Image (cartoon, rainbow, N blue to C red):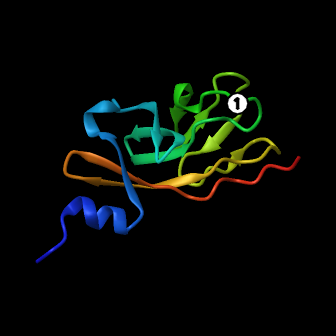
């Protein structure tokens, strides 16, 4: 007897985030996955997930402008790589980047450890 797809996804650390139609191409959406707020992006190069809050001032990264595999925070224009969460063009901390997998019409996310921010 084989395990159900949802059981296999859970075993791999993947959690359902949304349906593929919930995030329009070229945009981001905020969602909560396993109690953690993330920003999920659908771009021409694929799907990406990063922590939702900008470490600079808690800006909503899902509301930022996504382009060139990066997102710009709508509050103070801090830029982050969608694939790694690394800061681009500033010395501030990055954000955690999470693995995304599409299975059928479902978007699954494997959460990474949070990025430590210096006090």
The residue positioned 67% from the left and 37% from the top of the image is 79
Front residue (pair 13, 28): 13
Residue position marked by numbered label 1 in the rendering: 58
Q: Does residue 67 appear left or right of residue 96 in this picture?
A: left
Outermost residue toward the top in this view = 75
The answer to which image quadrant residue 36 occupies is top right
Outermost residue toward the right in this view = 119
Q: Residues within 10 Å of mark 1 (few under 14, many from 20)?
A: few
In the rendered image, residue 26, in percent from the top left (x then y), is placed at 40, 31
The residue positioned 42% from the left and 63% from the top of the image is 13
The residue positioned 62% from the left and 31% from the top of the image is 72
Outermost residue toward the left in this view = 1
The answer to which image quadrant residue 18 occupies is top left
Q: Does residue 83 appear left or right of residue 26 in this picture?
A: right
Task: Point out the image quarter for the N terminus.
Answer: bottom left
In the rendered image, residue 109, in percent from the top left (x then y), is placed at 41, 52
The residue positioned 64% from the left and 35% from the top of the image is 53
Q: Does residue 112 appear left or right of residue 78 in this picture?
A: left
Is 36 above or below relative to 75? below
The local secondary structure at tag 1 comes to loop
């Amino acid at each position: 007897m084989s395990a159900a797809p949802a059981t296999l996804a859970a075993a791999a650390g993947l959690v359902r985030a949304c349906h593929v139609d919930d995030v329009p191409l070229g945009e981001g959406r905020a969602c909560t996955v396993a109690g953690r707020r993330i920003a999920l992006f659908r771009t021409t190069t694929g799907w990406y997930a990063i922590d939702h809050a900008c470490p600079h001032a808690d800006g909503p990264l899902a509301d930022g402008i996504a382009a060139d595999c990066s997102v710009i925070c709508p509050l103070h224009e801090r830029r982050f790589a969608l694939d790694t969460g690394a800061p681009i063009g500033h010395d501030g901390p990055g954000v955690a980047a999470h693995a995304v997998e599409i299975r059928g019409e479902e978007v699954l996310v494997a959460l990474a450890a949070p990025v430590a921010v210096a006090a």
